[in-house]
Image: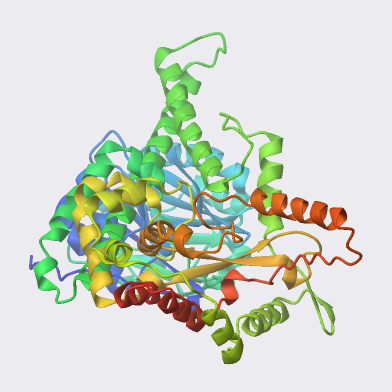
């Protein structure tokens, strides 16, 4: 057998409206055929594959398939080595899996998909090849399927029998004994009952007479044992069914396309799951991965590009770790539930106890508890403590939080609108006008600058422009607040804090390179802008506050600059300004105002004007040109001004 070609899977649906299914009996030894199976799925652009005779699948084989192909391999093992079924689902559709369960160990499994309010039950079946065993199995299967007779059902696999003469072809006339042997592969009264009860039909129902195909070959003939059945009222959604020859199994694969509208999902913003950092094994993997990346530094001419590429390198590793853990947890939950179902049948008396049953129930509760904790953390709801069971209050709070920051209607010049496109257009127009730079009044700027008399001294300037130390970076990093939304690189402050022992020196070097080159990478300066509702009427955009979610690189650098700047502010800023200057408090202004009023009353002044001014979006509308001119007037070193300008 020649070596299989390399696998490079894309798996995109044509026009994003088709799901391509395949069924294949791999005929044992899946560990030796893994690459060939993956190549078949890749070249034929399959999204969901039904596999039979998979009992030799081990964790290594499963991980190989999931790592190389993505998605999830749902395994159903049996006791005999000739048994076993598995369903592989491409990552595009894995997100739609609602439930996966073993129906009959080693013989049948069911997976529920929910695709934009359309629920599909897919059944992978491997029917026994002797009549007695087959009828017993099909009777069991019938009972399992009957509760779903009103649903959208899709059944595929190796049925090990045929329904019509057209599905069988013999190379020569058979003896009576051979005909009796082959009769085992023909017809099934129970299957006919299943078809009638579930209202399903062979997807090749209207093609058999004119275009016979055969999926299994043997010495005296060939048969179509591998088939798909679909709910009769959904038959019109199928097309392009075809045979796919294979050289590594005694069966050929059979595939078809299901036409169902799949909405194009919006690009998601990736965020590192901080819980992964609490797992020591996962944290060590991430740290070791970064140590490997350090060996690539000399291959990059620009150290900032190396740093950026390294973050992407770590991101892929973290995604892989999280994906693996999620699949392991899902499979463990499925195995535990299947085992519990079996024990429930063995111990039907509710007063009977069983140690294994209690242990399984405990493990299932732990998994559910972990999932609940994840919902709680992601919700970011304040003033509600975590509980093993989420209360009605929690879900009400979660719903209110989601709706609070959603713009469902806007009041415009032409009235109120709820149309999404009009809302987007109005938001764009409003903030474009708001943040359009207005021309600076040079005359007023000169007056203000000429009024500034104090300057930074030489010693202060030397402190401001000296290189950043590892100690300074660490102190800055570890005083930053946790549980904050990250920037567009998805890395929160916890990721830097937990990996500090291995990234500390590299992080410091990166910051000093920014300082020397006076430039940051595009990703470091990128931001996610989000609108937060403040108060009053939600339909007016003036009542929404835009915030920029910046990445940690930017935050650390800006915080270091701000920390150094704070040390000189008391010496150059007028005592009348209390905000933002260390050692001064805003209530000082209140005392000043109180004393001023008392002075006016004491001197019996007739006229007094007190004006309280609030600039709209003041921090977002500061003139950068004026700010840089002010720094220069205060005597800040040119290198420090350039560092500030880099931001």
Which residue corresponds to the image point at 51% horizontal and 75% vertical from the top-left?
A: 452
In the visual, does 106 lie left or right of 177? right
The residue closer to the viewer here, 131 or 373, is 373
In the visual, does 252 lie left or right of 397? left
Which residue corresponds to the image point at 59% horizontal and 61% vertical from the top-left?
A: 577
Can residue 171 be spotted in the picture? no
In the visual, does 330 lie left or right of 293? right
Say which quadrant the C terminus sits in.
bottom left
Q: Where is residue 460 in the image (x, y as percent from the top left)?
A: 32, 62
Which residue corresponds to the image point at 39% horizontal and 77% vertical from the top-left?
A: 645
Say if 392 sits above or below 487 in the image: above
* Displayed quadrant of residue 574: bottom right
* Displayed quadrant of residue 211: bottom left
Q: How many labels does the image show?
A: 0
Can residue 281 be spotted in the picture? yes
Residue furthest to the right in view is: 606
The residue closer to the viewer here, 524 or 182, is 524
Q: Where is residue 227 in the image (x, y as percent from the top left)?
A: 41, 61
* Displayed quadrant of residue 78: top left
The residue closer to the viewer here, 66 or 586, is 586
The residue closer to the viewer here, 326 or 41, is 326
Q: Position of residue 461 (x, y in %)?
A: 31, 67
Residue furthest to the top in view is: 351
In the visual, does 90 lie left or right of 247? right
Q: Position of residue 255 (x, y in %)?
A: 38, 68
Say which quadrant the N terminus sits in.
bottom left
């Amino acid at each position: 057998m020649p070596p299989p070609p390399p696998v490079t899977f894309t798996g995109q649906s044509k026009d994003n409206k088709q799901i391509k299914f395949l069924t294949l009996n791999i005929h044992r030894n899946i560990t030796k055929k893994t690459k060939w199976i993956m190549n078949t799925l890749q070249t034929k652009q399959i999204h969901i594959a039904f596999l039979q005779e998979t009992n030799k699948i081990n964790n290594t084989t499963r991980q190989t398939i999931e790592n190389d192909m993505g998605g999830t391999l749902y395994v159903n093992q049996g006791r005999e080595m000739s048994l076993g079924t598995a369903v592989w689902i491409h990552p595009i559709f894995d997100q739609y899996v609602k439930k996966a369960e073993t129906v009959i160990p080693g013989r049948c499994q069911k997976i529920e998909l929910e695709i934009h309010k359309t629920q599909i039950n897919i059944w992978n079946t491997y029917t026994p090849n002797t009549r007695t065993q087959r009828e017993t199995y099909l009777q069991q299967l019938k009972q399992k399927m009957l509760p779903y007779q009103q649903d959208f059902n899709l059944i595929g696999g190796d049925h090990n029998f045929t329904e019509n003469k057209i599905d069988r072809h013999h190379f020569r006339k058979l003896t009576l004994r051979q005909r009796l042997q082959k009769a085992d592969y023909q017809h099934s009264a129970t299957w006919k009952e299943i078809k009638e009860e579930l209202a399903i039909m062979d997807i090749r129902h209207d093609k058999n007479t004119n275009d016979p195909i055969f999926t299994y070959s043997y010495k005296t003939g060939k048969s179509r044992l591998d088939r798909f059945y679909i709910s009769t009222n959904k038959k019109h959604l199928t097309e392009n069914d075809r045979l796919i020859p294979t050289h590594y199994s005694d069966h050929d694969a059979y595939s078809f396309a299901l036409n169902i509208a799949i909405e194009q999902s919006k690009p998601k913003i990736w965020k590192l799951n901080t819980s992964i950092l609490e797992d020591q094994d996962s944290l060590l993997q991430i740290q070791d991965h970064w140590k490997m990346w350090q060996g690539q530094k000399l291959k990059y001419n620009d150290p900032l590009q190396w740093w950026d590429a390294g973050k992407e390198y770590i991101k892929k590793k973290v995604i892989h770790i999280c994906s693996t853990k999620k699949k392991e947890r899902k499979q463990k939950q499925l195995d535990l539930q299947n085992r519990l179902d079996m024990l429930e049948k063995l111990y039907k008396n509710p007063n009977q106890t069983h140690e294994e049953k209690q242990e399984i129930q405990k493990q299932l509760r732990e998994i559910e508890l972990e999932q609940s904790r994840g919902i709680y953390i992601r919700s970011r709801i304040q003033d509600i403590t975590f509980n093993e069971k989420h209360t009605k209050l929690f879900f009400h709070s979660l719903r209110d939080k989601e709706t609070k920051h959603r713009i469902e209607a806007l009041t415009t010049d032409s009235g109120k609108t709820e149309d999404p496109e009009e809302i987007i257009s109005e938001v764009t127009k409003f903030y474009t006008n708001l943040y359009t730079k207005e021309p600076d009044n040079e005359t007023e700027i000169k007056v203000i600058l000429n009024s500034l008399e104090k300057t930074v001294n030489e010693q202060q300037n030397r402190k401001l422009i000296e290189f950043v130390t590892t100690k300074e970076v660490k102190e800055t990093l570890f005083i930053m607040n946790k549980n904050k939304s990250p920037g567009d690189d998805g890395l929160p402050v916890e990721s830097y804090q937990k990996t500090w022992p291995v990234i500390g020196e590299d992080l410091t070097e990166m910051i000093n390179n920014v300082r020397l080159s006076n430039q940051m990478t595009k990703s470091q300066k990128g931001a996610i802008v989000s609108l937060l509702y403040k108060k009053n009427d939600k339909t007016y955009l003036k009542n929404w506050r835009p915030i920029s979610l910046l990445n940690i690189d930017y935050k650390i650098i800006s915080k270091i600059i701000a920390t150094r700047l704070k040390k000189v502010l008391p010496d150059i800023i007028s005592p009348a300004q209390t905000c933002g200057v260390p050692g001064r408090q805003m209530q000082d202004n209140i005392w000043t105002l109180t004393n001023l009023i008392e002075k006016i009353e004491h001197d019996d002044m007739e006229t007094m004007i007190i004006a309280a001014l609030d600039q709209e979006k003041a921090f977002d509308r500061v003139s950068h040109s004026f700010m840089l001119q002010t720094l220069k007037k205060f005597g800040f070193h040119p290198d420090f001004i350039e560092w500030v300008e880099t931001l």
